């Protein structure tokens, strides 16, 4: 199944991690990113095949290498962004800090720090959105700017804004 957004993504040339966004500026689903990364890596792997390889293949070039680097960076960032919300979810569902730390291969204190940083970011985003909603139209922002900003933040992976007391 294909959507117009997936078709746009498939045709998009990626050179920087910031290129990896939907048309509206939101996050591109990880499976889409992995699919595109696999295509670039396949072409790069084909460079190692002999010149007289019997099948028709595409060989990678510098553009494929740059795209693979940019996509890898984007994927890493998206996964890191998701970690803290998963930490919160694991704690809410009864996991211990030691279990969470083991799953992340870090100490329990580092896991707590990761969650605190994420929760602080969520708080700052909510305050920013609330402030922008209070800015009167005509002060340099359109009336829907704050709504768009909050929606774009949510699409960029900042979706859970309430942190349970059990996560602190």
Image (tube, grey):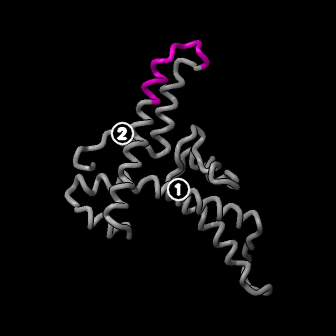
Give the left or right position of residue 80, taking residue 101 as reference.
right
Find disc 1 in the rendering and name its residue: 77
Q: Position of residue 143 (x, y in %)?
A: 53, 17
Task: Kindly give the residue lying farthest to the left in the view shown.
Answer: 94
Please give the count of numbered marks on the rendered protein.
Answer: 2
| Disc 1 to disc 2, C-alpha distance | 19 Å
Task: Kindly give the residue lying farthest to the front in the view shown.
Answer: 109
Nearest the eye: 61 or 146: 146
- Whether 80 is drawn above or below 6: the answer is below
Find disc 2 in the rendering and name its residue: 161
| Label 2 element class | loop
Q: Is residue 134 magenta?
A: yes
Q: Residue at x 57, y 40 (%)?
A: 25
Residue 47's image quarter? Answer: bottom right
| Label 1 element class | helix
Mark 1 is surrounded, within 10 Å at the Cα level, by few (under 14), some (14 to 19) or many (20 or more) other residues, namely few
Q: Position of residue 128 (x, y in %)?
A: 46, 30
Q: Position of residue 105 (x, y in %)?
A: 38, 70
Nearest the eye: 29 or 156: 156
Give the left or right position of residue 32, taking residue 98 as reference.
right
Q: Which mark is residue 55?
A: none
| Magenta segment boundaries in residue numbering | 128-140
Q: Is residue 20 magenta?
A: no
């Amino acid at each position: 199944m294909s959507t117009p957004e997936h078709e746009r993504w498939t045709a998009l040339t990626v050179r920087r991690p910031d290129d990896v966004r939907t048309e509206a500026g939101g996050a591109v689903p990880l499976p889409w990113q992995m699919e595109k990364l696999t295509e670039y890596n396949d072409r790069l792997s084909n460079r190692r095949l002999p010149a007289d390889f019997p099948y028709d293949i595409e060989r990678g070039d510098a553009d494929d290498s740059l795209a693979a680097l940019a996509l890898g960076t984007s994927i890493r960032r998206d996964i890191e962004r998701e970690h803290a919300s998963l930490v919160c979810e694991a704690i809410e569902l009864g996991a211990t800090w030691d279990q969470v730390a083991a799953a992340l291969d870090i100490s329990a204190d580092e896991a707590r720090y990761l969650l605190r940083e994420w929760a602080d970011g969520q708080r700052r985003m909510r305050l920013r959105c609330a402030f922008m909603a209070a800015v009167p139209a005509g002060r340099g922002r359109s009336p829907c700017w704050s709504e768009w900003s909050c929606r774009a933040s949510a699409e960029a992976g900042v979706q859970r804004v309430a942190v349970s007391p059990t996560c602190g």
